[in-house]
Image (cartoon, rainbow, N blue to C red):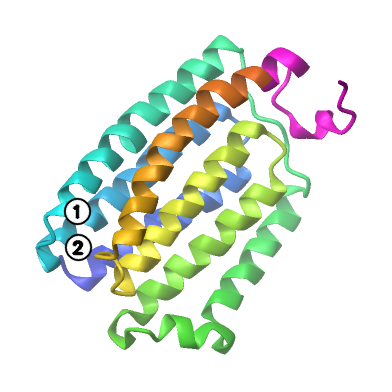
Amino acid sequence: MNALFLQLLLTILFLSIVFLHITKKNFAVSVTYGVQSMAIVILMIHSFFVTGEASMLLIIGLIFTFKVIIAPIFLVKLIKRHKLTFSVSTYLNTPLTLIIIAILTAIAYSQSFAPLTNIIPDNKILLQIALSALFLSLFLIINRKGAISKIIGILALENSIVAFAIFAGLEQSSGLQIGIVFDIFIWFTIAAVFLTMIHKQFGSLDTAKMRHLKD
């Protein structure tokens, strides 16, 4: 794959996170996460052909199965079951959210993070995009009120970390690969048990309504 195609995949990752910030529909959030994860799968396939690391085939298979296929389907079913057609709002309105996104992106491209984005000079632009996506994922977790959006924000953060690690030359790290596998299995537990319990207890997945917890 040439550099332009790799940059396109990272741009899809970045723009998908921007979209997660502004969309109001839970269905769109779920589908967007699947598209984002597919971009990560393609990046991992590229990394496999470059490194020839056999263990990456298992990681690629798990990411595709759980994050591209099962996760979006499961979340859509959860949305239909609890009639969560629309997600709850963000703490900041859309204009302020976009301003913060622009600021975080500028910070990722600034000289302050040059030591990180220059780990591999040839991948500087790719690392800057991945770092921007990482910052925006953190902001998504903070800014969204909906529990589904927050969980997808955490998973998007993991996708961003994987993308950054690939272009920082860390994709063969056993720690990273174990972390990916752990994340894939733990998200199902969180989504299947935690979200259902929240909705049953509070009748909503809006985390802003959980300020006054009862025993």
Q: Give SS at disc 2.
A: helix
Which is more foreground, mark 2 or mark 1? 1
The answer to whether residue 41 of the structure is visible from this angle is yes
Residue 37 position (above or below residue 68): below
- Residue type at numbered disc 1: Met
Residue 114 position, x and y percent, is 49, 87
> What residue is rendered at 59% in x and 32% in y?
148
**Residue beneath the point at 57% across and 63% down:** 135
Q: How busy is the neighbourhood of tag 1: few (under 14 within 10 Å), some, or many (20 plus)?
A: some
Upstream in sequence: badge 2 or badge 1 = 2
Residue 47 tag number: 2
Give yes or no for contact between labels 2 and 1 (Cβ–Cβ under 8 Å): yes
Stretch of the chain drawn in magenta: 198-215
The residue lying at 69 percent from left, 25 percent from top is: 205
Q: Is residue 205 magenta?
A: yes
Which of the two residues, 32 or 49, is positioned nearer the viewer here?
A: 49
Q: Residue 63 appears in which quarter of the rendering? A: top left
Is residue 85 visible in this depiction of the protein? no
Q: Residue at x 43, y 44 (%)?
A: 183
Image position, residue 206 (x, y; %): 74, 29
Instruction: Please name the residue that numbered disc 1 is placed on.
Output: 56
| 134 falls in the magenta region | no
* Kind of element beneath mark 1: helix
Circle 2: is it few (<14), some (14-19), or many (20+) Cα within 10 Å? some
Q: Position of residue 174 (x, y in %)?
A: 29, 60
Image height of 179 relative to 74, above or below: below
Is 73 placed above or below 24 here? Answer: above
Q: In x, y percent, where is residue 178? A: 34, 52
Cα gap from disc 2 to disc 1, whole angstroms: 8 Å
